[in-house]
Image (spheres, rainbow, N blue to C red):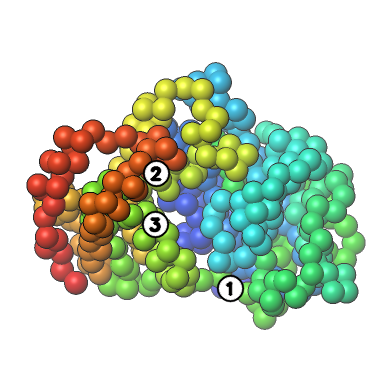
Amino acid sequence: IFSLQSRSDFFFNNCDLHFKVARDRYSGYPLTIEGFAFLWSGARATYGVRRGRVCYEMKINEEISVKHLPPTEPDPHVVRIGWSLDSCSTQLGEEAFSYGYGGTAKKSTNCKFENYGETFSENDVITCLVDFECGDDVEMSFMKNGKWLGMAYRLRKENLGGQALFPHVLAKNCAIEFNFGQREDTFFPVPPGFTFIQHLPLSERVRGTIGPKNKRECEILMMVGLPAAGKTTWAIKHAAANPAKKYNILGTNAIMDKMRVMGLRRQRNYAGRWDVLIQQATQCLNRLIQIAARKKRNYILDQTNVYGSAQRRKMRPFEGFQRKAIVICPTDDDLKDRTIKRTDEEGKDVPDHAVLEMKEGLAPSSLSH
């Protein structure tokens, strides 16, 4: 029996807003209503490791029914499992130092997808193994239902710079359960010499970033600016420059990033109506903003927010947060260039009359600082 302090469970600040952690803290599932069924949803464990030979298990309990998805949707039910640094995003396997193995029999890191292992789905159990006792290297491997699938990753310890690797999952329309060592019985035997992460003393584990303790410590930055003004670029750069704040960016671009297929944005390979998908992403965003106001985190609200009435309405649920406005005003020439680039890259085309209306309505923000 483990004390509450020694538990290695999921921590709310380390998961996407649309990932629902169960009361037992060892299982969870993503939202699947409406457009959420297109989205990946990720979560990272509270504790990581940087020494020893450590493991954990993940079982797919259910492939949640998503009959509202179009029949053309590739891999509507899939899970990616593995390890990442605390500084990585929730999109496992799509950046450096983020190492995943997915149910399509692919491993991925830094958006490089390669064949590995076998496919896995409902009721399968994947064991994730990390071995720091390989001389100057770290090795990661996986097992499916007790069968070892071979080494997936080998990297130099010095590349990690002493940072810990944390258990990490990325799921699409699947309910999942974890065994960090809290179960009396393992799902399947683990290789000799490997220890479940929860069986390690606290002194041998590394705690991930701890979020704000109360609303007064939380921050919401509201971007204000015309379409293509550079709001998303500013938000991404600001979040990257302040990793300890773990900003959640709330915007349609951030949602489209969670709709990737094999690491690629959907614009390049989507068969359906693009305007409908954008509309669904906007509906998801409105729901996420409602969820966000109830969570103690730091946010960047990445929308146009040009009208004073909209600013007040959107900030009302975040009462008690530190609320700040970031106004982006490029020159007319810069705005024109950015608009052309944005239409080409993102498929978003805002009518001229709508932009003119926004220009007229661009209100000096009246938020409290």
Residue beneath the point at 65% across and 54% down: 110
Q: Which three-letter amino acid code belongs to the residue tagged 1?
A: Arg
Along the line of sight, the residue nearer the viewer: 183 or 95: 95
Q: Which residue is mark 1?
A: 207
Q: Nearer the viewer, mark 1 or mark 3?
A: 3
Residue drawn 26% across and 57% down?
330
Tell me if 193 is positioned left or right of 334 in this view: right
Q: Residues within 10 Å of mark 2 (few under 14, many from 20)?
A: few
Mark 1: few/some/many CA within 10 Å (<14, 14-19, 20+): some
Indicate the position of residue 339 as horizontal and vertical percent values: 32, 44
Mark on residue 341?
Answer: 2
Q: Nearer the viewer, residue 65 or 84?
A: 84
Residue 1 left/right relative to 20: right
Upstream in sequence: badge 2 or badge 3: 3
Pick the front one: 349 or 41:
349
Q: Earlier in the sequence, mark 2 or mark 1?
A: 1
Q: CA distance from mark 2 to mark 3?
A: 13 Å
Most distant residue in the front direction: 333
Name the residue beneath numbered marker 3. 233
For the residues labelled 2 and 1, the Cα–Cα distance comes to: 41 Å
Q: Amino acid at mark 3?
A: Thr
Q: Residue at x 40, y 34 (%)?
A: 347
Asked whether residue 313 is in view, the answer is no
Picture residue at 39% right of the left edge, 44% below the top: 341
Viewport quadrant of the N terminus? bottom right
Q: Quadrant of residue 117?
A: top right
Where is residue 103? Give x, y as percent. Answer: 70, 38
